[in-house]
Image (cartoon, rainbow, N blue to C red):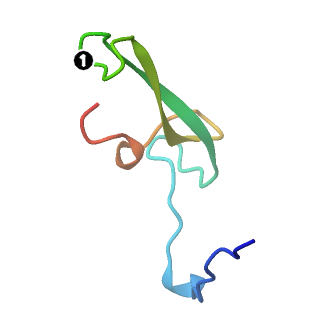
Amino acid sequence: MTKPPQFNIDFSQTHPLKCDECGNQYFNEVLMIRKLSALLSPTGQAALIPIPMYACSNCRHVNEEFLPEDQ
């Protein structure tokens, strides 16, 4: 079994991310679901594509920086 890489991070050199709407700094992982047409799918069948992102745990807002580039 391989161990995940360990990083020596100095958290004093980081900054907390905050919700753009309410200023909360706690987030939950949520999924955006995109549907791929059967015509474009490599399998020839429609597919659902989950895209993980983070939503504010207080107001559920998703900051712009968490959205995929081409939504």
Of 9 and 41, the residue lying toward us: 41
Q: Where residue 41 sits: x, y (%)?
A: 31, 19
Within 10 Å of disc 1 (Cα), the crowding (few <14, some 14-19, many 20+) is: few
Say how many tags the image has: 1
Residue 2 vs residue 59: left or right? right
Position of the N terminus, as image quadrant, is bottom right
Residue 21 vs residue 6: left or right? left
Q: Where residue 10 sits: x, y (%)?
A: 57, 88
- Label 1: which secondary element: loop
Q: Residue at x 70, y 74 (%)?
A: 2
Of 7 and 41, the residue lying toward us: 41
Q: Residue at x 59, y 50 (%)?
A: 24
Residue 51 vs residue 3: left or right? left
Of 5 and 22, the residue lying toward us: 5
Q: Residue at x 65, y 74 (%)?
A: 4
Q: Amino acid at mark 1?
A: Leu
Q: Where residue 30 sits: x, y (%)?
A: 58, 35
Residue 18's place in the image compared with 44, above or below, is below
Q: Label 1: which residue?
A: 40
Q: Where residue 21 sits: x, y (%)?
A: 47, 40
Position of the C terminus, as image quadrant, is top left
Residue 20's place in the image compared with 17, above or below, is above
Of 2 and 22, the residue lying toward us: 2
Q: Quadrant of residue 39?
A: top left
Residue 38's place in the image compared with 27, above or below, is above
Q: Residue at x 26, y 42 (%)?
A: 69
Residue lying furthest front in this view? 43
